[in-house]
Amino acid sequence: MTQDDRGQGTAIAPARDESGFVWHPVYAGKSFAQVQNELAEEIARDQRSYKLAIDGAELSEHDSLVTVVELERRWSAYEFDWSEMDAKALAQRIVKFEQECERRQETLSFADYRASGALLEDTPVQQESTGANIPILKIGLVLLAVLVIILLFTIM
């Protein structure tokens, strides 16, 4: 706060750095590239965890289901098929959204951001070509296995 000629205090807005976050409640002080790299690494790690949880569903249904649900909650708001897409592309999408929050200096929900049409300006997100993997089918199978187990316990 500084004093103007009349002796009244005026607030000075922080200088905007075009290459990094200044205001953002989570990423303040970090560059856009740094945040994008961190997100890409985190997404790639979570994609590996997701695949391991799906593959291990036969051994431990409950643990797999908990892991899958937690990871879906974290990333599916940004992209429904997040587990199959390129981690760098998803990180880029998230950073673009967070840059808009920084520009407006307000916290937005990604759903509102998407509803505004901002994602339509994006180029299509490239999918990893991993074959005919359908995560919805895998999740459905895990849920079906859990329901069958619950049904068996209630019958006994």
Image (cartoon, rainbow, N blue to C red):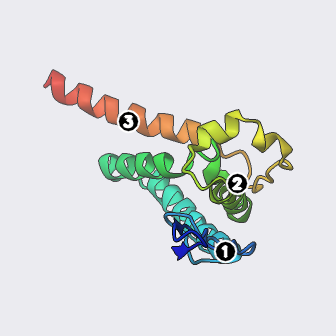
Under mark 3, the amino acid is Ala
> Residue at (65%, 53%) from the top-left corner?
104
Mark 3, residue position: 145
Q: Quadrant of residue 96?
A: bottom right
Does residue 103 lie above or below 15 as drawn? above
> Of helix, strand and loop, which one carries label 1?
loop
Q: Is residue 34 above or below residue 152?
A: below
Secondary structure of the residue carrying tag 2 is loop
In the rendered image, residue 41, in percent from the top left (x then y), is placed at 60, 72
x, y percentage for residue 68?
44, 49
The residue that mark 1 highlights is 15
When asked about the image quadrant of residue 80, the answer is top right
Looking at numbered disc 1 in the image, what kind of residue is underneath it? Ala
Direction top: furthest residue: 155
Figure disc tally: 3
26 horizontally vs 5: left or right: left
State the image quarter where residue 27 is shown: bottom right
Q: Position of residue 116 (x, y in %)?
A: 72, 35
- Image quarter of the C terminus: top left
Closer to the N terminus: mark 1 or mark 3?
A: 1
Choose between 143 and 115: the one closer to the eye.
115
Is 8 displayed left or right of 30 in the figure? left
Query: Nearer the viewer's eye, disc 1 or disc 3?
Result: 1
Residue 12 or 67: which is nearer the viewer? Answer: 12
Q: Which mark is residue 85?
A: 2
Report, in whole angstroms, how far the alpha carbon at label 1 lies from the one at label 2: 36 Å
Residue 147: % across, % down: 33, 30
N-terminal of the pair, mark 2 or mark 3, is 2
Q: In the shown orientation, is residue 126 left or right of residue 41?
A: right
